[in-house]
Image (cartoon, rainbow, N blue to C red):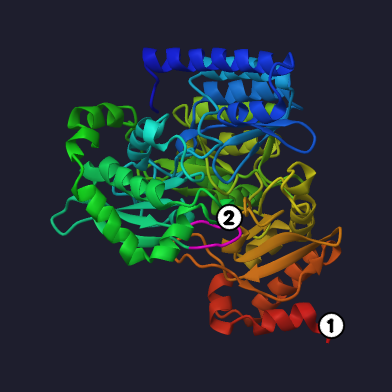
Amino acid sequence: MYRYDTLDKEFLADRALEFRQQVARRLAGEITEDQFKPIRLMNGLYLQLHAYMLRIAIPYGTLTSTKLRKLAFIARTYDNGYGHFTTRTNLQLHWIKLKDAPEILDHLAEVEMHSMQTSGNVIRNITADPYAGATADELDDPRVWSEAIRQWSTLHPEFSFLPRKFKIAVTAAAKDRAATRIYDIGLAMRRGRDGELGFEVMVGGGLGRTPYLAATIREFLPTRHLLSYLEAILRVYNRHGRRDNIWKARIKVLVASLGAEEFARQVEEEWGKSDHSRVDLPDHELARIRASFAGTFDTLPAASEALEARKAADPAFARFLRRNVHPHKAPGYAIVDVSLKEPGETPGDINSEQMEVVANLGERYSQDEIRVNYQQNLLLPHVKLDDLPAVYDALAAARLATPNIDLVSDIIACPGLDYCALANARAIPVAQQIAERFADPALAEEVGELRVKISGCINACGHHHVGNIGILGVDKKGEEFYQVTLGGSGEGDAALGQMLGPALPAGKVAEAVEQIVGVYLRERKDDERFLDTYRRTGVAPFKEAVYAEAH
């Protein structure tokens, strides 16, 4: 993991002190809430329905045990004892008192954390493949490039007041676990004909009111030119992006209006006239960053007798291995997904005691690393096979061993109207109702891979547009209704979902999902995923099942 140097630490301490002074002015009534708003937003502090919410940055979703313990301490001391992991791999605390915010920033600074770039019209927290450095299918460690982008973009004077917020995702693996097509810029590492590493550059993705999948504007960009090319993209956006209409301000609208080909032409023209050496990362600096992510692994046998014995004797452990444990690039190791989706609980929520359990496991069994993924779960990236039984037992005791990764109860959901002032409807209760219908792990496993995603409003923080089953909360004359879409995907086969039919009342949503799953089980062939069956049959049989009573 990248470690801050002395200048980084001094900067964070100074920033926290400056914010403390501004909070004091607000509490003393020297500035109004409207005057304070841009100041607090630049420090990740939102005002929601019931309290202030602090969004804490977790760059490329990577934590140490020390950092996670600090988050547990903050949640216990200054919040209600829990936090919420988001689809941006950040942590949100929803019950913050304004007077406490400066102290929280001080605590974060102590462990090289902050809340910058989690709000405002800036380049937001960089996200990456959560299996980075652990999976065998990657060409390089995407955290190296994510960290380079983070350092380049933080407080960049030219890009601190963009037309709208801006998000970048990076992957270097064959499987897209970072949902790169739904980002303002998605970067997917490729190998050129001569073996050189580079990126496919995708621009103009984004969900919300007008969802788009990003278009590829460059098939291959040598890695050495990454930062100068990003600068060219952002300059074109800064030049043309709408500042008079918030609904048309995102780069996705610009790319759609110009056309991907014309946008790419302008980027190439801008890039061609720039001095790349002024921006691109020098080899020695890249080497310095890369050294921060160099992992070492013991030489171990590829199999574990103790693991196999426990697996044969314990069906629950065997199911956990099937659903939550994945191959590692090093023999004798595994990647362990930690589900924050126990049926009946709030997706993405974790209490302080659970954070400490995961922190202890990360320190003892996973080379002091914990990851956050955009599906609102955690993972331990480097666990020895012999240690899997102990890790499982500790997770199970903390109610963190639900064997449902990528299954129907592994639901993405935004906080919705329970917290968010922008929401039209609640998302959490709907997610809980659906998960409880599939709480039987045998049933969920029989259904197989099926990604359900729920948003409480059109801003799509729950990624509903790219859910295999997507659910959007809408307000109809003061009542909560939900639109259902089918066939979306945020992975390599990215697609936007298709509307199923008229919006459903809240009490009918879980039943509708159950009916949709029933149609899938009836119609699927062999080992088809839900998405494969839907693409083969189309929407008709699912629509007929859900709306049969209306006819």
Q: Of residues 439 and 507, which is closer to you in this image?
A: 507
Residue 495 horizontal side relative to residue 473, left or right: left
Residue 60 horizontal side relative to residue 277, left or right: right
Is residue 234 shown to the viewer in this render? yes
Over which residues does the magenta segment extend?
A: 205-212
Pointers 2 and 1 in contact (CB under 8 A)?
Answer: no
Element at label 2: helix
Tell me: residue 28, above or below residue 305. Answer: above
Tell me: residue 519, above or below residue 97. Answer: below
Tell me: residue 106, above or below residue 551. Answer: above
Which residue is label 1 attached to? 550
Residue 247 - label:
2
Q: Amino acid at mark 1?
A: Ala
Is residue 218 shown to the viewer in this render? no
Q: Amino acid at mark 2?
A: Trp
Residue drawn at (77%, 31%), measured in percent from left and top? 51
| Quarter of the image that includes the N terminus | top left
Residue drawn at (57%, 46%), measured in percent from left and top? 87
